[in-house]
């Protein structure tokens, strides 16, 4: 039987029989001249009824080629017939019945001259019913006209869809009105991270229907039967469960549910995104606040995280299920999950779960002070933001502290709590006095001077650092565009028992009030400027809260010489230089500017001999230190000038000068002379005459 363009075709095969060999009949009696037995009549009856048993079509088709006079026997009888006007549409619930009826019989001729006598045979029928069911199974909860047998009837339920334990899944209450539910198939997939930030079923271009991790089949034995299954994945992930409900007509409904399974992850913190006080002073690493003593704000944006959940997009939106599967006929993409069967319940549904880096909420507590343990209650439970502003009803005093606790939660209930202590200080530090000490010879850096500071104090936060720079007076710019920093070390009790300290500070630190700040003279000048520049040292004294006061220091001068006999031996102390020294140049002249001798030495020495010096005649000597690497184009320092007379008595050597390139007396003008670098400065002592020239 087949239907082709409105033509229904039928083929019937009926086994015929006759003769004694078939039924072990006795031999034909002698009075029977002739006989024939077999199939004498056949027809096909076609009836189409709907789900309410109303007839939509009925027709009977007779088979040809047989009769009482020519029955078919000893072979299969084939009946070919057709309906040429079959224009009935089969609907779900229709029953297509085909009844094949055959009748046997035959005849005999006896020798009495009466003629043929016909046998009345028997009739046999066979019916085929084809039931049409194009409707998918449904759940008892979907139709108001149908009640569920059990109150626990669910399409598919995950006992805990966010779990550290094996996954338990169950379902009950599926029905199919026409052909009944035959079986269930349960598939498990592990979702992958999508390129658009979503989670997806692991489809690829090569495998449009991937093999699930597992697939388990359950046969239905009772209407609305209940089933359950337990599965423990071997790694954390978001798992997609797809349940196929299949009826006897091979119609299928599909339901999807999701589970987060993760027995191993934990909440951690990312130090590159700190938990800090946004109301704090950035200079003090946000640990100190300087104003608004009643209002405090904090941020922990991107600080807490569950790395496994973040990297795997565990809480991201899950894509719609793409239609798939085809049976090669009219059904394309029949494996689909409509919205009513997709996961919209529980914690891990298809929708994204609001989070930051896998963290879904925070508890926040606060208190005045710094030595509290973890809080028993939180003023802001289930806080959804990564920042908060807290207002207190009392002012913090300088030296007070304010503690904030933040507890971060992931979807599994794992937590991590951290505390931030914010200190308060609105007052600047104080300095009693500061003294510039020249050329102290520190082992850690060459050509060193220092600032000796007394009474560097802040009782609320202590003096923690000093920043200093050198500013060229001609351009008002910072030399080398550099700022230097000195950190006042934290002191222990032994030190503070012997020296004045700011102790018992909120941070637990102690800082000495006496500070020796060493610095290199080389910081103060560029080599190209040694002959033309004056600089100022600027110093900012900071407390731990980031507040500061400023001080300036200067100037720097340099030095020296002696006289020996009628012939003068001029000497100086050539200090080590920040730059390469080629040698020196001197110009020796009488007071009326008549040059007696001028000479350049491309070697380093600290003396020069002046011969044939006339008595009672005033002379002038100018000395230049030569810097740089090019002997044809040296850089000259500022000249060291001095005037002297030939004494009538031998001169006395003066060895009390200063080191060239060193720092001279502290002056109120606060200027740094260019000779922070080794420029010779000479003093000549003649009885009754003492002159010092720096210009």
Image: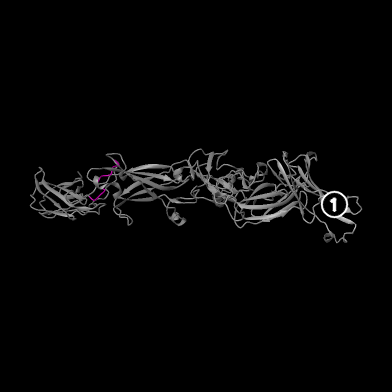
Type of colouring: one colour
463 left or right of 119?
Answer: left
Image-quadrant location for residue 671: top left
Q: Residue at x 66, y 46 (%)?
A: 346
Residue 251: x, y in percent? 70, 47
State yes or no: residue 147 in magenta. Answer: no
Residue 254: x, y in percent? 67, 47
529 left or right of 297?
Answer: left
Mark 1 is surrounded, within 10 Å at the Cα level, by few (under 14), some (14 to 19) or many (20 or more) other residues, namely many
Q: Residue at x 52, y 39 (%)?
A: 293
Residue picked out by circle 1: 106
**Residue range of the region highlighted in magenta in the rendering:** 669-678
Q: Quadrant of the C terminus?
A: top left
The tally of labels here is 1
In terms of secondary structure, what is the magenta stretch mainly?
A: loop
Q: Residue furthest right?
A: 112
Q: Nearer the viewer, residue 497 or 260?
A: 260
């Amino acid at each position: 039987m087949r239907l082709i363009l409105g033509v229904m075709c039928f083929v019937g095969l009926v086994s015929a029989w006759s003769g004694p060999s078939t039924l072990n009949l006795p031999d034909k009696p002698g009075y029977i001249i002739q006989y024939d037995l077999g199939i004498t009549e056949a027809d096909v009856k076609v009836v189409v009824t709907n789900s309410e048993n109303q007839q939509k079509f009925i027709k009977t088709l007779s088979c040809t080629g047989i009769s009482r006079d020519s029955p078919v026997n000893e072979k299969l009888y084939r009946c070919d017939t057709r309906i040429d006007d079959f224009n009935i549409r089969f609907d779900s619930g229709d029953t297509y019945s085909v009844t094949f009826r055959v009748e046997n019989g035959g005849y005999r001729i006896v020798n009495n001259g009466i003629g043929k006598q016909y046998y009345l045979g028997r009739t046999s029928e066979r019916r085929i019913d084809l039931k049409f069911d194009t409707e998918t199974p449904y759940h008892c909860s979907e139709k108001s006209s149908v009640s569920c047998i059990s109150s626990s009837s669910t399409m598919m339920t995950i006992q805990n869809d966010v779990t550290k334990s094996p996954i338990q899944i169950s379902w009950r209450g599926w029905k199919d009105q026409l052909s009944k539910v035959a079986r269930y198939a349960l598939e498990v997939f592990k979702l992958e991270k999508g390129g658009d930030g979503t989670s997806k079923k692991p489809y690829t271009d090569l495998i449009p229907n991937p093999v699930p991790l597992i697939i388990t089949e359950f046969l239905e034995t009772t209407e609305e039967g209940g089933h359950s299954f337990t599965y423990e994945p071997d790694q954390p992930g978001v798992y997609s469960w797809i349940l196929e409900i299949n009826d006897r007509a091979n119609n299928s409904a599909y339901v999807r549910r999701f589970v987060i399974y993760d027995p191993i992850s934990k909440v951690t913190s990312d130090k590159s995104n700190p938990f800090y006080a946004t109301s704090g002073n950035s200079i003090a690493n946000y640990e100190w606040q300087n104003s608004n003593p009643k209002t405090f704000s904090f941020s922990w944006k991107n600080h807490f995280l569950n790395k496994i959940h973040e990297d795997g997009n565990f809480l991201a939106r899950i894509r719609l299920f793409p239609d798939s599967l085809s049976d090669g006929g009219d059904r394309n993409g029949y494996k689909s999950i409509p919205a009513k069967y997709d996961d919209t319940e529980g914690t891990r549904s298809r929708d994204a779960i609001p989070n930051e880096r896998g963290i879904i909420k925070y508890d926040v507590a606060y208190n005045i002070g710094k030595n509290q343990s973890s809080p028993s209650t939180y003023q802001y439970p289930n806080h959804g933001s990564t920042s908060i502003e807290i207002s207190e009803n009392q002012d913090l005093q300088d030296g007070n502290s304010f503690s904030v606790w933040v507890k971060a939660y992931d979807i599994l209930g794992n937590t991590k709590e951290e505390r931030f202590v914010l200190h308060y200080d609105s007052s600047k530090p104080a300095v009693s006095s500061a003294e510039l000490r020249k050329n102290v010879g520190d082992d850690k850096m060459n050509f060193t001077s220092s600032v000796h500071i007394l009474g560097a104090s802040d009782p609320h936060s202590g003096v923690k650092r000093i920043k200093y720079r050198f500013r060229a007076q001609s351009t008002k710019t910072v030399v080398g565009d550099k700022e230097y920093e000195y950190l006042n070390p934290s002191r222990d009790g032994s030190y503070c028992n012997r020296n004045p300290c700011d102790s018992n500070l909120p941070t637990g630190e102690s800082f000495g009030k006496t500070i020796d700040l060493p610095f290199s003279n080389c910081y103060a000048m560029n080599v190209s400027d040694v002959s033309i520049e004056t600089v100022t040292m600027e110093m900012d004294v900071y407390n731990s809260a980031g507040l500061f006061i400023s001080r300036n220091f200067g100037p720097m001068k340099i030095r020296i010489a002696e006289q020996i006999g009628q012939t003068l031996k001029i000497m100086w102390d050539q200090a080590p230089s920040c730059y390469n020294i080629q040698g020196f140049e001197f110009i020796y002249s009488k007071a009326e500017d008549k040059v007696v001798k001028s000479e350049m030495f491309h070697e380093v020495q600290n003396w020069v001999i002046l011969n044939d010096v006339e008595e009672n005649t005033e002379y002038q000597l100018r000395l230049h230190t030569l810097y740089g690497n090019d002997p044809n184009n040296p850089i000259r320092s500022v000249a060291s000038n001095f005037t002297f007379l030939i004494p009538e008595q031998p001169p006395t050597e003066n060895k009390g000068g200063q080191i060239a390139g060193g720092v001279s007396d502290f002056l109120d003008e606060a200027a740094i002379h260019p000779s922070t670098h080794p420029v010779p400065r000479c003093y000549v002592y003649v009885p009754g005459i003492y002159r010092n020239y720096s210009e």
